Image (tube, rainbow, N blue to C red):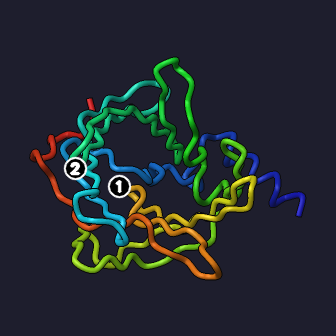
Amino acid sequence: MRHALAALALLLAAGCDHLVDHRPRAIFSPWEEGRTLIYEDPSRPMETRTQVRVKSLTTTPAGSMAVKTFSNFTMQIDATYRLHEGLVAERLDNGNEIMILPEGFPDKVSRWESRGAMNFVVGWAKVDLPGVKLPDPDAMGVWVEMVAPGGARQRTLWVPDFGEVQAMIWVRGHWLTVNRLVFQGFSDAPRLGGAK
């Protein structure tokens, strides 16, 4: 056993780090410039649909900064999100952030607290969105459950490169869908070469 540990120490000291996974962590948020997502609450009129469009993406030492435009028939706002190693956080005007998903999500961090609510990974699931074509027909997403301090429960399905694709709330003993992706595409052709 001592010889095996010594051999491993020599390999690591020699810079042999091929055992370490250097692949970039999946981004559970839309990040490609021009990507447009349209969501609806099935219980509400179509006029309440919300469109999310990635306006811009820049890379900084602290992670990528994605500016997204949220719009519907009555409003349009821009919001900035920091994306880094699984982290998805909304950047506020005062420089503070609201963490949506933690760094290390979903394989290194499966439980976290944000704004007083407890969040935990429920598990992976195949994405089934009738009428929505994803680039990968076998796409998998991660269900996350949030339990608010008062006991209200919400489950959200997060998919790499798309972020939230479905959200459900627990109402009188069953899950009710309150937000789901009904369209995805590009309003502009994606820039070649990725982020600046």
- 64 left or right, relative to 144: left
Identify which amino acid the numbered label 1 is placed on: Asp
Give the number of marks: 2
Residue 40 in percent (x, y) is at 31, 63
Q: Nearer the viewer, residue 172 or 69?
A: 172
Q: Is residue 111 above or below residue 11?
A: below
On residue 135, which mark appears? none
Q: Nearer the viewer, residue 43 or 146?
A: 43
Q: Seen from this angle, which residue lies furthest top? A: 94
Q: Nearer the viewer, residue 144 or 180?
A: 180
Badge 1 crowding class, 10 Å Cα cut-off, few under 14, some 14 to 19, many 20 or more, is some
**Element marked by disc 2:** strand
Residue 173 in percent (x, y) is at 64, 82
Residue 94 in percent (x, y) is at 52, 17
Mark whose residue sits in front, 1 or 2: 2
Identify which amino acid the numbered label 2 is placed on: Arg
The answer to which image quadrant residue 132 occupies is: bottom left
The residue tagged 2 is 35
**Element marked by disc 1:** loop
On residue 161, which mark appears? 1
Q: Is residue 194 above or below residue 6?
A: above
Q: Is residue 66 above or below residue 51?
A: above
Residue that appears at 48% across and 29% down: 91
Query: Which tag, 1 or 2, sits closer to the chain's start?
Result: 2
Q: Nearer the viewer, residue 143 or 23?
A: 143
Residue that appears at 25% across and 43% down: 74
The answer to which image quadrant residue 47 occupies is: bottom left
Image marks 1 and 2: residues in contact by CB distance under 8 Å? yes
The answer to which image quadrant residue 81 occupies is: top left
